[in-house]
Amino acid sequence: MAAYYIIAFLAMLALVFFGGKRHQWPSAKLFGFLTWIVSVLYFPIEVVAIAISPVPYDFMTQAMSDLGILPCVSDTYLIGNPEICSPSSALMNSTFIIQGVFIAAGAIILHQYWSNGKKTRVAAWLWVIYGLGYAMSGLYPYDVNFWLHTIPAIPSMFLQIPAMWITARAIRERMPKLSRLTYIFMIISVIALAALVIGLPAGLMQRILYASVWIWMCIASITLWQRNPIK
């Protein structure tokens, strides 16, 4: 657990340091672009974690959080009793922490490239809450503290929807293609969330829900980078 606190501290330090220099340093701007682009690296990391699990892991039905559980257990869930064993829990929890903080950092740094208005500031803060809530799921794995793992992560299940809607509306004249793409990914996110709520395979729906955000972030960041090359 101490290692996770250190990772979280260092990631937050990077957020504060580069976020504070976002208008001045080219390196801070580069950091901002990369924080959202690297979000899609979660899935290759997850593939590795699943591959080395000594017990069967079903990505269709099992939650992403299962890969961050520290010991090998069979009675972690409040409901149900799947066998879970993740030797790569340190890798996965570190990924959750770093990815979440990076999403928040990207929201702060990249805000300068959207239309600078009240709406986009609201969207940026929604992304900050989204990212930091997601990071908490790695700081407190499911088996360590169920409530500190679950409650802060809830915003990362739905805040992307208003954030993407606000962003799409704000950029529809300046970046119409990205605006339309944002609406598409927002709709995918809505459908995945609804499917998760009504009981379709939870693992698959959770991954589609997050993938719709992270792929959009990667595309949005690359688009903003192309429009605002670092000098």
Image: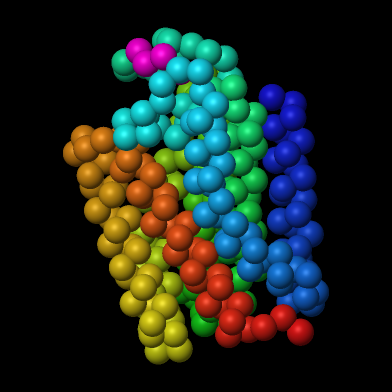
Quarter of the image for residue 168 reads bottom left
**Can residue 133 be seen in the rendering of this structure?**
no
Residue 143 sits above or below residue 179 on the image: above
Q: Dividing the image into 4 quarters, which one contains the C terminus?
A: bottom right
In the image, is residue 81 above or below residue 164? Answer: above
In the rendered view, tell whether residue 106 sits above or below residue 73. Answer: below
Q: Residue 86 placed where, x, y %?
A: 54, 23
Q: What number of labels is visible? A: 0
Is 148 or 228 nearer to us in this picture? 228
Residue 200, image x and y in percent?
22, 37
Determine the residue located farthest toward the bottom in the rendered image: 173
Quadrant occupied by the N terminus: top right
User: Which residue is depicted at the point 50% across and 63% down?
Assistant: 217
Q: In this view, does 126 lie to the left or right of 186?
A: right
Q: Is residue 84 magenta?
A: yes
Residue farthest front in this picture: 51
> In which image quadrant can residue 29 be found?
bottom right
Q: Residue at x 45, y 35 (%)?
A: 64
Magenta residue span: 81-85
Q: Which residue is drawn at 61% across and 71% down?
A: 110
Q: Where is residue 154 in the image (x, y as percent from the top left)?
A: 42, 41
Decide if residue 184 is in sight here.
yes
Main secondary structure of the magenta stretch: loop
Left or right of 194 on screen, residue 25: right
Residue drawn at point x = 65 percent, y = 63 percent = 34
Specify whether residue 120 is painted magenta: no
Is 158 on the left or on the right of 34, as rendered? left
